[in-house]
Image: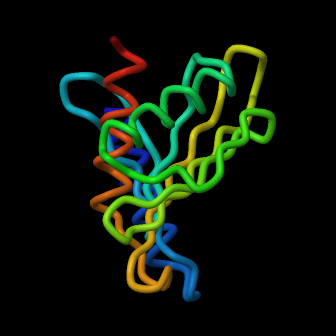
Amino acid sequence: MKNYLMMLLLLIIFNSTVSCVAPVVIAAGAGAGATYSLTADSVSDNFAVSKERAVEIFSQIIKREKGKLILVSISEGKINAEINNIKIYFRAKPLTPNATKVIIKARKGYNLLPDKETAINLFKKFVKVING
């Protein structure tokens, strides 16, 4: 019920504003009960994991996907990577020592166009590792 009210509120706010800001959608995972935020080019959520562990996990996912790690900074919580000419940007922002906001962004076409599918796919793989 709460998710439906939130969606309704977001739709009302979105329809009542006139701007060029990309819409934000809150999606709910049916069985898992997980929620995440999805914009035109990124997906994000908060996890009970340290920033360092989040970076570690995502770099392993990129390697498994046969991607190329361009930049990995555990101290900054940052990964820049590439998979099949799609640029991937991962950010882990610490909320507490054991809670982190994770943002995954994917861009294609000379880094101009959002690639929501790839961002969501990588996000799902991240969640799967976190949840065991």
Q: Is residue 29 above or below residue 118?
A: above
Which residue corresponds to the image point at 47% horizontal and 66% vertical from the top-left?
Answer: 87
Left or right: 125, with 95 as reference point? left
Q: Is residue 123 above or below residue 43?
A: above
Find the residue positioned furthest to the left: 31
Q: Please name whichever residue, 100 or 16, is drawn nearer the observer in this view of the structure.
A: 100
The image quadrant of residue 4 is: top left
Q: Please name whichever residue, 83 or 13, is drawn nearer the observer in this view of the structure.
A: 83
Q: Position of residue 16 (x, y in %)?
A: 51, 78
Quadrant containing the C terminus is top left
Left or right: 56, with 127 as reference point? right
Q: How many marks?
A: 0
Which residue corresponds to the image point at 20% horizontal and 31% vertical from the top-left?
Answer: 30
Colouring method of the image: rainbow
Q: Position of residue 12 (x, y in %)?
A: 44, 67
Which residue corresponds to the image point at 36% horizontal and 59% vertical from the top-left?
Answer: 83
The image quadrant of residue 122 is: top left
Q: Position of residue 121 (x, y in %)?
A: 28, 48
Q: Position of residue 20 (x, y in %)?
A: 56, 87
Which residue corresponds to the image point at 45% horizontal and 53% vertical from the top-left?
Answer: 68
Quadrant containing the N terminus is top left
